[in-house]
Image (spheres, rainbow, N blue to C red):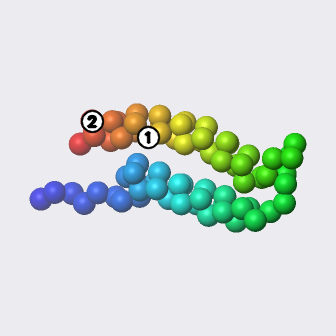
Amino acid sequence: MKQKKNIMKNPGIIMTVILIAYAIFLFAWFPTSPGWLGIPLFNWLMIIGFFIWTTQSIIFVFWAEKVEDEE
């Protein structure tokens, strides 16, 4: 009998939840006035988001491979 996997330990599900949470946060700030150095806060969050997604993607690759090796 195959053991049921815990869905909350799936790297893809966790990455998707983080992506959705960040998108909700980002678009909550979309209609705001200009932020720092005359650049809207939305643009700053998009720039910061690029580095977050790059780091998260690297972590995801290593995590997914670790999960596959354990199976």
Q: Find disc 1 in the rendering and name its residue.
A: 60
Determine the residue positioned at 55% across, 36% down. 55
| Residue 62 spot, x, y in % from top left | 40, 34
Question: Which residue is farthest right?
Answer: 37
Please identify the quadrant where the N terminus is shown. Answer: bottom left
Instruction: Say above or below: 25 vs 40.
Output: below
* Residue 69, numbered label: 2
Q: Nearer the viewer, residue 10 or 1?
A: 10
Residue type beneath disc 2: Asp
In the rendered view, does 36 fall on the left or right side of 29? right
**Residue 6 rendering spot, x and y as whole percentages:** 34, 58
* Residue at 60 percent of width and 41 percent of height: 50
- Name which residue lies at 39% across and 51% down: 12
For this orientation, the residue located farthest to the front is 38
Location of residue 34 by image quarter = bottom right
Left or right of 25 in this view: 7: left
Q: In this view, does 57 lie above or below 15?
A: above
Picture disc at residue 44: none
- Look at discs 2 and 1 and give the one toward the viewer: 1
